[in-house]
Amino acid sequence: TKAGFPHFMIKEIFEQPKSIEETLNRRVHNGIIDFSDVLSDDEINKFDMIHIVACGTAYHAGLQGQYALREISRINSLVEIASEYRYMNPFVNENTLAIFVSQSGETLDTLAALKEAKSRGAKTLAITNVVGSTISREAHNTIYTMAGPEIAVASTKAYTTQVTIFQLLAIYLAEKKGKLTKEKVEKLVSSLYSIPEKIKTTLDNTEIIKNVANFMKDKHNGFYIGRGVDFATALEGSLKMKEITYIHTEAFPAGELKHGSIALIEPGTPVVVIGMQSNLLEKTISNIKELKARGAHIITVARKSCEEAIDVSDEFIGVEDIEDVFSVLLAIIPLQLLSYFTSVDKGIDVDKPRNLAKSVTVE
Ligand code: M6R
């Protein structure tokens, strides 16, 4: 049931504090992260490469995973779209850890990619939300997200729990590989535990987002930009907008727009900017200025306290403060809400947008 909410999607957006907490609780005991049931120390010592393979929103979670693995654990990884991976003759062998991300555990391309990696000797791990799903049965081991059933076609809580798993896994592997002190691990874990409360602050305050949605509903196109891992968040925000509002949006690394696509900016073109990476903020602000000079309507998601961003934005959506690498879990919430409210304003069937099914079991 929708538990009093008008749609499954908004119910699922609001369930995220709980589903993230449950996903953490499933893997953290007395402050210690444990993945030993799915990955032995021998396996951890053996792999020299991680492949992350998925489709759609799960692919975006994979991009977040790659960033966390690089930043926190200094482990090299490759992220690929499953329908490409399966036909690309990938460099995969017994020294590869291959991770397949799928909410449903039934996506055909992801399953086929898994079989491909497995046949070439990789250790395969699934991250899925559905116990006993085909992908979970095919993989050597499975990490379950604790999102509970996700009904809306647009994935929300599955995504944030997948990202949570990657953050935990990155910390776990970093610790195993001697790249983080015990104190640092404790600090990161407690920071992850602060996320549910910090998400609630955004959920309790949706007025600004509703106003932005009201502006978005009459637009036919727009952009999402961000630097570093904020680009992955931009991709996910943009997909959510396309899927349930039918507004054509595109995501770009903030510095890339000027290499062609800025030609599409006209007075009033909405540009959603994600500005959560502290070391890149100044650069993002100068991109905002370039866009404003061409008439773009700037909607920024950044830390509440980010005066520089407030000054240059037409609309500003502030989120709580946290380490840059975890901030992606806070920044995506307003983007989910923005697409939801825009869809409702347009009178679209939010939970079942046209041309889409919840799980894609055809090629
Ligand atoms: O069940 P899966 O995670 O394998 O599904 C993958 C994609 O089809 C899915 O994430 C799709 O992109 C969503 N509708 C996005 O909201």
Image (tube, helix red, strand yellow):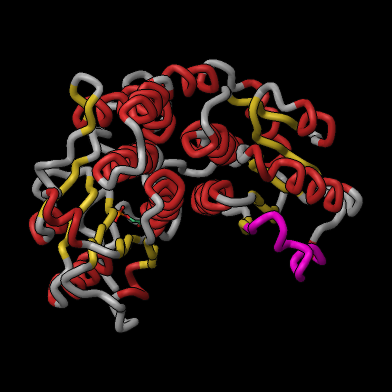
Q: Which residues are magenta?
A: 252-263
Residue 319 x, y percent position in the rendering:
59, 25
Please tell me which residue lies in front, 8 or 169: 169
- At horizontal 19% and vertical 29% (from top left) the residue drawn is 26
Quarter containing the N terminus? top left
Q: Position of residue 119 (x, y in %)?
A: 13, 76
Residue 227 picture location, percent across and down: 63, 51
235 and 268: which one is in front?
A: 235
Q: Quadrant of the C terminus?
A: bottom left
In the orientation shown, which residue stands out farthest toward the right? Answer: 293
Task: Answer whether residue 23 is visible to the viewer in this image.
Answer: yes
Q: Residue 253 lies in magenta, yes or no? A: yes
* Depth order, front residue of 180/237: 180
Q: Residue at x 13, y 59 (%)?
A: 139
Q: Is residue 38 above or below residue 32?
A: below
Examine the rendering and report whether any part of residue 5 can be seen. no
Looking at the image, residue 132 lies above or below residue 342: below
User: Is 214 part of what is drawn in magenta?
Assistant: no
Instruction: Tell me which image quadrant ligand 1 sits in.
Output: bottom left
